[in-house]
Amino acid sequence: MRQIGRILAVLWAITYISAVPASATDCANPPGWVPEDLTELLFEHRIWATEVLPPDPHDPRRLNLCHADLSHMDFSGVNLSHANLATTRMVGSNFEGAILDGVEFDGAYINDSNFEGAQLRRASFRNVEITASRFAHTNMDHSIFQNIKIDTSDFTGSRFEKALFRRTTLTDLRMQNVALNQANFRDSLMENIDFSGADLSQTAFVRSTMTQVNFTFANLSRANLGQMKLRDVSFKNALLYLSNLKRIDIGEEKRDHIATFCQNLTTARDWQYSYRKKKFLCGAKISPGKYPLK
């Protein structure tokens, strides 16, 4: 039995190792290098990325800039789809209107850079730090944001449909009129975020914390705010139709505190149809949970 157990353990280890993708630290390039033949590399990558058949990720024409210092470089309008930009440094870089679908940014440092109007669908942002950058009107549908810090940046009018945010720290962000429908936030910290006018329908905010968040005129219909900590959150004119507020944490649930929360909640639209604790009935004639979520 012990021998069988050892064999199973070895098989499990082999399966696990083969399943784990190569990390950004496996980069063969020296840290901080600056590509000298970048024009030629971009030309070859564009041919590879635009082939009729699905491009081979192991093709040498695929752009691999891992560990590169891309500060103050201009990539505006360039096709960088599925390139490897892991562990790169981007300070004052310009990617305005660039095609960055499927790009790997894992481990990158981005500061004071411009991504306005760029295509970033299915991009990977793991262990990334972004500060003072502009992502307004970008398309980031289905992208992954994990163990990431984003601070003092502008995402106005951007799309994040079905994007995944896990263990993220988001502070001082402009996210007015973003499309975050069916996105998933888990174990995240959000502070001083402006979601006014945003589409957050069917978005899940699970085990996350929100402080000084503005949902004015946001669509939170069928959103899941389960196990969330809410501190100084504004629901004024937000749509809360069939939103799940059943397990929210508003802090100490004393009478005055509940009354303050109810005063805030009742400024929203269709708040009466949201799922919530009975103590948060807030004078509604419709019992919480009367209508199904689906």
Image (cartoon, rainbow, N blue to C red):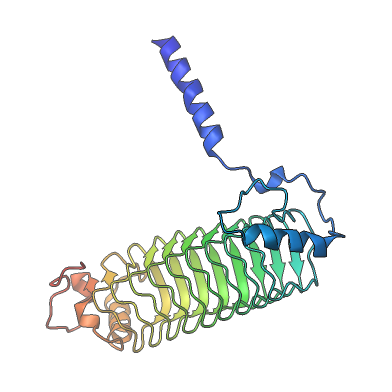
Query: Total of numbered circles in the picture?
Result: 0
Report x, y in % for residue 111: 71, 71
Pick the residue in front: 65 or 87: 65
Residue at 12% across / 72% down in the picture?
Answer: 290
The answer to whether residue 278 is visible is yes
Pick the residue in front: 197 or 236: 197
**Considering the image in quadrants, where does the C terminus appear?**
bottom left
Locate residue 195 relative to residue 35 in the image: left or right. left
Q: In this view, does 17 lie above or below 214?
A: above
Quadrant of res 113: bottom right
Report x, y in % for residue 215: 41, 82
The answer to whether residue 108 is visible is no
Residue extending farthest to the front is 52
Locate residue 127 relative to residue 179 in the image: left or right. right
Locate residue 220 relative to residue 165 in the image: left or right. left
Quadrant of res 232: bottom left
Residue at 66% across / 57% down in the picture?
Answer: 48
Quadrant of res 220: bottom left
Pick the residue in front: 87 or 254: 87
Residue at 65% across / 68% down in the picture?
Answer: 130
Q: Is residue 31 above or below residue 155?
A: above
**Considering the image in quadrants, where does the N terminus appear?**
top left
Report x, y in % for residue 25: 70, 45
Report x, y in % for residue 72: 80, 72
Residue at 75% across / 56% down in the picture?
Answer: 65
